[in-house]
Amino acid sequence: MDSQANSDSRLSFPYSKGIFFRLILLLISSLLTVCAPSEQSNLGVQDFEGISLEGENIRISDIAADRIALNVYGPNCLPCIKEIPVLNYLNAELKKNPQIKLYMIVDPDIFFDNPEALSTEQKMKEAAILMKEEVKKFGIQLPVIIMKPPFKVDRTEGLVTGTPETLLFKTKPLILYYNFIGPISEESDPNKIPKNMKVIFFKRMAGQS
């Protein structure tokens, strides 16, 4: 049985070899197409915008920086709160390079039990008030943006499925290139934070050596 199988295999080898090389060429062609530089942004991020706690309208694609990091925060999210010491440290560190910007962003819907009952304007206004309380209560030092639609934290679909999550973007055009699911680190000791391997990795990914 085995000899027959080997014999059949040898007889069909030239044909199989031809198919193999055609498949390789097709695969290479496909990869080149996928990896080719694109002038377009991805995942709808070009439309991301919101309002700062000071009332300034901020469009993410208009931020003057080479790299942008957006930390997605949620109220009553324990990992989000535990991450704040690390975020405050990173905020101070990344400020040393004007070409890297770090923001905390919030989906206003997550502040309300029935967000569909409120207008976007109402949600934005109320969420800003509530977020100011969060900033004061937990000592958040990052600039905060209350996001407008189409940004949304959605467990079933969309770019962000939960909190915390940190998105890293390159600009010109705005392209998402990495996202950290969960807290970057929950280290709270200020002496240990700079040596934390997760923190060091994040800084490198954000463009700070």
Image (cartoon, rainbow, N blue to C red):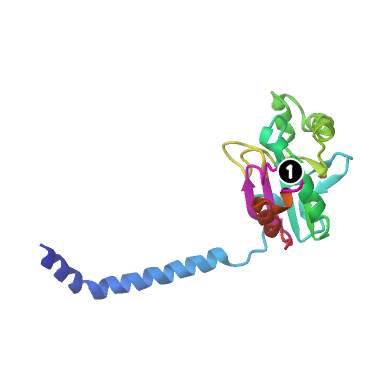
Q: Which quarter of the rendering shows the C terminus?
A: bottom right
Q: How many marks?
A: 1
Q: Amino acid at mark 1?
A: Asp
Residue 156 belongs to magenta span: no
* Residue hosting label 1: 189
Residue at 14%, 71% in the rendered image = 7
In the figure, residue 106 lies in which quadrant? top right
Q: Which quarter of the rendering shows the N terminus?
A: bottom left
In the figure, residue 164 lies in which quadrant? top right
Where are the magenta residues, as a range? 166-192
Which residue is farthest bottom?
14
Which SS class for mark 1? loop
Residue at 70%, 37% in the rendered image = 82
Relative to 4, is 162 above or below? above
**Residue 177 x, y percent position in the rendering:** 64, 57
Residue 169 belongs to magenta span: yes
Q: In this rendering, would 56 be left or right of 4?
A: right
Residue at 69%, 59% in the rendered image = 204
Relative to 43, is 186 above or below? above
Q: Nearer the viewer, residue 177 or 42?
A: 177
Quick one: label 1, few (<14), some, or many (20+) residues within 10 Å? few
Q: In this rendering, would 52 be left or right of 86?
A: right
Q: Nearer the viewer, residue 44 or 159?
A: 159
**Residue 205 x, y percent position in the rendering:** 67, 58
Q: Does residue 45 show up? A: yes
Relative to 101, is 21 above or below? below
